[in-house]
Image (cartoon, rainbow, N blue to C red):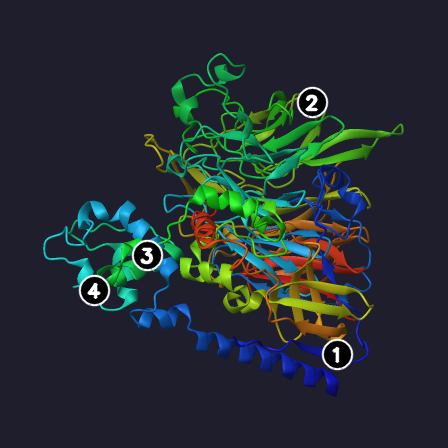
């Protein structure tokens, strides 16, 4: 038998520092997830920590040197679907999802690939709004991904091979998973998508070891359960209320918070009289049992598809007399910014952050005083909302809350009777554009901004949570689907549909730096460090772009 | 600099030489082109698949369908192995020949069996038992000390959770007897001494001009810049032991039967 000789080469003296990457086999424990702030070089959960502030303590990049950022590496996805993912970074290894359901492990400093796992979703999968995925969760040395055919898959961090797969829902019912799962203790928590298909929404938890279902919380209470009376007919069976975005967790209260989506059919509330709990709400659940602790409904009997599918931002906010208050900040798709007590769900304050006319205000309990517009008139904000699922950020340094908003943007809602048929679109009408000659901004369009200011404009808004007032605003010509990241040095990173990646001064809102990435940014930027060097990563178009300071 | 460039050329040369050695020994593709060169493991696997999936229509002698005699080695709609695979996978429209969902190992087995059906002496076949094979995998074979299946076992060797989806029975059978000969080149072990003196030994996952990615002996993902390394060595001998002497032919067939059940979870 022919044997090849071993070959060796000796490299010369070291000239550059070693770019060494190691993933620890023992992995990411729940304790590490709880204390994610102690390891700012990593990005361990979708929102960068259980309180979902999207704020990094890394401080190498500052307003003074941000101009020295350069592209360090680019990863090109093999898919042309919208790249909505937030990567995870663990000890120098980045774990990334490519749409629809491919996972890639890369060297976070160099962008070279360790492995790639491609899951092929069932042909029956029918996510409403793109074959997208927003990211992964990690526990120990296992990654967790939800798929657009409503499966939950556990994947080995080192080999990239799936370990188990559990059916969370049935794609033929319109179920899908597009969110990054949330780990709490030894469980993997997900929320289902399918609010446009007449599903009955739910949030459910699975044993991280085995994939077995531990609990399932229906976001629409069944007969005999409290809240069922808010469905005055049989509409609860097909009432929607999906939960398609990752929630947050408060270890002190031991509660998981999750936003819920629109009731169905979307635009014909006459078919589903009542408040329609727990649609367009936030629910607080016991992570061990899925039991409801409290709920707060932002938009009762929602006729506008004002999904409350935003990331709950949890802040221990300095109290006037000393100490902190356990608050939840929530810029809702309905155009109001809310402050809630997150231990009880009590409404504290609420203010519009964009122009709106569907309500004239909020009462003492936070319930909107609704002002339905006459048929044919324009309702503000429009169907995509004042904001949407785009991750906001809270900076403990500036004590400001930052969000991506759509301004001067409305729709004319036209209700129609809809008949439920399993797995078929169940919308109950349509949202027409404000101007009949115009279009409604959807999820994607070409490279020319033919929507223009007539359809609406985008902005990053800085709110003072103490008052709900706007501190500054950075306006963009086109609307934006980007998340926001803030740093300890008061740099704010965000993007937009125009394909610019911006760095703003988080205190004043001035533009510090921008890069032209040539594709829509529809995800939240993250920051991490390898061997002390700080990186900023964001997906744009079909590429992931990673920046660091020029050496 | 000169030393480093010289070194890289050596590495490249070794890869090319290895590719040549593999081609000379006969790859799966070459086997397909020449009837008579199908591996016994593929033929055996194909025979059992035929019994489970084909025999009810085509009959034990291959002549159960009017006008079709599989033993003749002549196929109306297929001349190449590729075309045979297409028919097995996609079926023939408007006939009772339905599409079949088969992975890489199964297709290779079915084709090998169909090609050799006419000249086969079935009494030659050593058919394995998957349950016995699983016990051997975990016991006498000690395979889990290097390999992983479904989250259990070491990651130093390739994860076998879905090995049947992309390795044929013939290739796996060959690996059990002569691991070096059958080794996929990307899996070669590398020995590295980094600039700071840290030593790594592991299985190569990916490599380019400037960097290399491995899983090391501690099951960690490691990525290194070649210019920073003191030593970089690619071993062409597999670290897997041969089971030619330590397992009997029947035991190897049992292990193979077990491996052929490994199709992953998604």
Chain hosting mark 4: B
Q: CA distance from mark 3 to mark 4?
A: 20 Å
Q: Residue furthest bottom?
A: B2
List the residue tagged with mark 2.
A346
Chain hosting mark 2: A
Q: Where is residue A155 drawn, in percent x and y?
A: 57, 47
Q: Where is residue A28 drawn, in percent x and y?
A: 71, 44
Q: CA distance from mark 1 to mark 2?
A: 67 Å
List the residue tagged with mark 4.
B73
Neighbours of disc 3 within 10 Å: few (<14), some (14-19), many (20+): few
Q: Earlier in the sequence, mark 3 or mark 4?
A: 4
User: Which quarter of the picture shows residue A35?
Assistant: top right
Front position in the image: A536 or A140: A140
SS at mark 4? Answer: loop
Q: Earlier in the sequence, mark 1 or mark 2?
A: 1
Work out whether disc 2 and disc 4 sit on a shared chain.
no
Q: Tell me which residue sits at (42%, 49%) in the image.
A: B257
Q: On the picture, is A280 further left or further right than A123?
A: right
Q: Is residue A481 above or below residue A337?
A: below
- As drawn, the label of residue B124 is 3
SS at mark 3? Answer: helix
């Amino acid at each position: 038998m022919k044997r090849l000789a071993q070959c060796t080469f000796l490299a010369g003296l070291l000239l550059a520092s070693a770019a060494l990457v190691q993933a620890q086999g023992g992995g990411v424990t729940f304790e590490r997830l709880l204390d994610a702030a102690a390891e700012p070089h990593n990005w361990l959960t979708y929102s960068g920590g259980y309180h979902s502030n999207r704020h990094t303590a890394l401080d190498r990049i500052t307003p003074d040197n941000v101009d020295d950022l350069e592209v360090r590496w680019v990863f090109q996805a093999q898919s042309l679907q919208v790249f909505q993912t937030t990567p995870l970074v663990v000890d120098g290894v980045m774990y990334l999802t490519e749409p629809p359901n491919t996972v890639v492990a890369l060297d976070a400093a160099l962008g070279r690939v360790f492995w790639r796992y491609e899951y092929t979703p069932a042909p029956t999968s029918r996510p409403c709004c793109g074959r997208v995925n927003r990211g992964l969760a990690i526990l120990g040395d296992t990654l967790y991904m939800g798929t657009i055919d409503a499966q939950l898959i556990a994947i080995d961090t080192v080999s990239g091979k799936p370990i188990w797969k559990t059916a969370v829902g049935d794609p033929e019912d319109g179920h899908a998973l597009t969110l990054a799962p949330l780990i709490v203790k030894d469980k993997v928590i997900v929320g289902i998508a399918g609010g446009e298909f007449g599903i009955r929404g739910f949030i459910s938890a699975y044993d991280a070891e085995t994939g077995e279902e531990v609990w399932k919380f229906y976001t629409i209470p069944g007969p005999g359960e409290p809240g069922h009376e808010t469905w005055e007919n049989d509409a609860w069976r097909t009432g929607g209320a999906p939960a398609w975005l990752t929630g947050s967790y408060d270890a002190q209260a031991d509660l998981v918070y999750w936003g819920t989506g629109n009731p169905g059919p979307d635009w014909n509330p006459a078919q589903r009289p009542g408040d329609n709990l727990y649609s367009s709400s936030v629910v607080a659940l016991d992570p061990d049992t899925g039991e409801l602790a409290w709920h707060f409904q932002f938009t009762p009997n929602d006729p506008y598809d004002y999904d409350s599918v935003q990331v709950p931002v949890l802040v221990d906010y300095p109290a006037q007399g000393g100490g902190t208050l356990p608050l939840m900040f929530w810029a809702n798709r309905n155009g109001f910014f809310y402050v809630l007590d997150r231990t009880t769900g009590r409404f504290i304050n609420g203010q519009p952050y964009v122009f709106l006319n569907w309500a004239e205000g909020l009462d003492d309990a936070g319930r909107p005083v609704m002002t339905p517009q006459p048929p044919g008139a324009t309702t503000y904000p429009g169907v995509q909302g004042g904001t949407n699922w785009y991750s906001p950020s809270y900076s403990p340094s500036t004590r400001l809350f930052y969000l991506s908003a759509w301004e001067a943007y409305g729709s004319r809602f036209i209700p129609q009777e809809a008949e439920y048929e399993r797995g078929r679109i169940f919308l109950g009408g349509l949202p027409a554009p404000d101007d009949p000659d115009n279009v409604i901004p959807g999820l994607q369009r070409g490279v020319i901004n033919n929507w223009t200011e007539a359809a609406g404009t985008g902005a990053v808004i800085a709110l003072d949570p103490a008052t709900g007032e706007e501190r500054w605003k950075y306006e963009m010509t086109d609307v934006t689907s980007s998340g926001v990241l803030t740093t300890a040095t008061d740099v704010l990173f965000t993007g937009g549909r125009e394909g610019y990646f911006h760095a703003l001064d988080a205190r004043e809102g001035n533009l510090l730096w921008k890069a032209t990435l040539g594709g829509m940014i529809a995800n939240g930027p993250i920051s991490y460090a390898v061997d002390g060097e700080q990186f900023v990563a964001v997906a744009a178009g079909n590429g992931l772009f990673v920046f660091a300071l020029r050496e | 600099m000169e030393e480093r460039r010289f070194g890289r050329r050596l590495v490249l040369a070794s890869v090319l030489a290895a590719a040549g050695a593999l081609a000379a020994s006969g790859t799966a593709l070459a086997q397909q082109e020449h009837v008579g060169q199908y591996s016994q493991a593929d033929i055996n696997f194909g025979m059992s698949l035929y019994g489970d999936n084909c025999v009810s229509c085509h009959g034990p002698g291959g002549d159960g369908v009017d006008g079709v005699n599989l033993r003749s080695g002549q196929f109306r709609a297929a001349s190449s192995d590729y075309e045979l695979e297409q028919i097995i996978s996609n079926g023939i429209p408007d006939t009772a020949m339905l599409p079949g969902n088969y992975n890489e190992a199964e297709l290779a087995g079915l084709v090998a069996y169909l090609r050799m059906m006419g000249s086969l002496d079935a009494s030659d076949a050593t058919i394995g038992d998957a349950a016995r094979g699983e016990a051997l995998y975990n016991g006498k074979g000690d395979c889990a000390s290097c390999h992983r299946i479904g989250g259990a076992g070491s990651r130093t060797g390739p994860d076998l959770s879905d090995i049947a989806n992309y390795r044929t029975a013939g290739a796996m059978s060959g690996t059990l007897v002569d691991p070096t000969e059958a080794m996929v080149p990307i899996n070669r072990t590398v020995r590295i001494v980094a600039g700071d003196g840290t030593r790594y030994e592991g299985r190569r996952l990916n490599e380019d001009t400037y960097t290399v990615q491995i899983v090391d002996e501690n099951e960690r993902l490691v990525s290194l810049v070649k210019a920073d390394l003191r030593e970089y060595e690619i071993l062409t001998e597999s670290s897997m032991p041969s089971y030619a002497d330590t397992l009997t032919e029947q035991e190897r067939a049992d292990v193979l039967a077990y491996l052929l059940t490994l199709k992953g979870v998604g």
